[in-house]
Amino acid sequence: MGMRTTAEAFIGQITSVSTVDDLETALHTICEPLGFEYFALSHHIDVARAGGASIRLHNYPERWADYHDANGFGVTDPVHRASHVTSVGFTWSRLPEMIPLTPHDRAFMELGRQHGIGDGFTVPAHVPGEARGSCSFANGAGRRMPHEMLPIAQLVGAFAFEGARRVWPARQFDPRASPCLTDRQRDCMLWVARGKSDWEISRLLGISEETVTRHVKQACERYGVNKRTLAVIRTLFDGTLTFGDIFWR
Amino acid sequence: MLHILHPAVETFPDAVMRAMFAARKSVFVDLLKWDVPVLQDRYEIDQFDDHYAQYLVLTDSTGAHLASARLLPTVRPHILGTLYPELCDHAVPTGPDIFEITRFCLDRRLRAAERRIVRDTLVTALADHALRHGIASYTAIAELAWFQQILAFGWDCLPLGLPRVIDGAQLAALRITISQQTPALLAAAGILRRDAHAGHTRREAA
């Protein structure tokens, strides 16, 4: 089979699934011809909502899964963090070039190697404002990375993520569910994000400190959070503010 | 307001076109740093903006640009066929009923919530336009992050080849097949026409 035909066959399998179980079976079948022993699909349907629905499908050996669970899989895992800084698939051996690794991260990865986890390839996937996740393919230690298959793995990962989004029952689609700030509230949140105090913001915007405090409080209320740091994170998540607003303008 | 513009068929509102070319400069040159020509320091216009290109442009009630897309006939020079044929593992799809979607542009002034409404409206307009004018499929080139979003629209979309790194960006070519089911597929994925701005009227040239 040519590369394209191989990719088409895999994508065909994934686009035809109609349940989460089917998707798991399809990924299981595709893994081996792709050159990997294991897959893990992690998909947060709604990351903004605490306890939002999430999918985790994998065929990792039990000892790997236990290891991940014991180490807070998905939250502090360096692979997951790295998948937030790129939209393109990456091999795990590239992690140190992609994100700063703490001593704990290095220990985590070393522990992984001791558990027999070798190199892997992770395809990050984001649908802005809605879903975030990744699809990883991995091998046990000592097995070679199938570099020639990675472009196919990239496409398979993208379609697997979309497949999960399609078949997962608890989907939420309402852009208006995200609150809309007033222009003034947004201005104030921008300066909060840049680390200014209410008094400093009042000087910058030429309004009273009390007014700034009120705008920030109301912005927090619109997001249903009680801390301004959380409100800033929400404005970044839903696109009310962008990182570019904070750092570069 | 949705404007569907065929330069070959009629003269079109100059202000709408100018606003679109200026918005394209703002998005593709200033924001995304594409290496494409800029006219008079203000307008992003390339060799494919000729009499054969068609445009779908959404404006608000004052005529300000919200979003736009350019459609190129694949029987003539177009981006996939002329510049990036290597993104297709087989022959580049061409034909009178295949158009290439290029310069899909959401205005930078839009806020997140408006952006999504405007984007969804433009996507449904592309599907409606295809059905009304006998377009069987669209082709397009996308960076991988955008590719994931295009998949999430729920329509029938498949890659034409494996992604490749070109000028530092990982690009993939794709084909979107349009059928009578497309509007329902889009709706099932939450892509609906929404009247973000009052007075959506339709004005067609051909």
Image: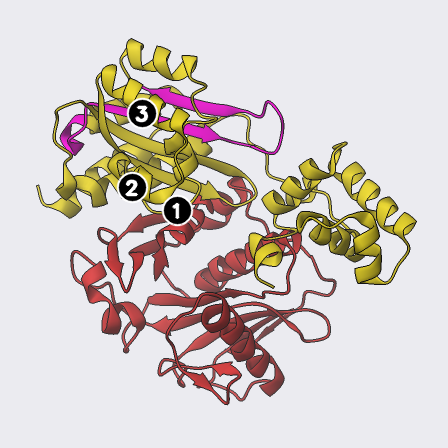
Q: Is there a contact, CB below 8 Å, between mark 2 and mark 1?
A: yes
Name the colour assigned to chain B in the rendering.
red
Name the residue rendered at 13%, 43% in the picture.
A148
Comes first in the chain, label 2 or label 3: 2
Check residue B17 in the rendering and tell me which mark sits there, or answer none: none
Name the colour assigned to chain A in the rendering.
yellow
Front tag of 2 and 3 = 3
Q: Is residue B180 above or below residue B84?
A: above
Chain of the residue where label 1 is placed in the rendered structure = A
Q: Nearer the viewer, residue B9 or B62?
A: B62
Q: Which residue is mark 2?
A: A90
Specify whether A242 is left or right of B27: right
A35 part of magenta stretch? yes
Numbered disc 1: secondary structure: loop
Numbered disc 2: secondary structure: strand
Q: Which residue is mark 1?
A: A86
Residue type at mark 2: give it.
Answer: Phe
Comes first in the chain, label 3 or label 1: 1
Residue type at mark 1: give it.
Answer: Thr
Rounded to the nearest angstrom, the CA distance separating label 2 from label 3 is 16 Å
Name the residue rendered at 75%, 56% in the picture.
A187
Name the residue rendered at 35%, 43% in the picture.
A98
Residue type at mark 3: give it.
Answer: Met
Q: Nearer the viewer, residue B37 or A215?
A: A215
Q: Which residue is mark 3?
A: A109
- What stretch of residues is rendered in magenta? A32-58
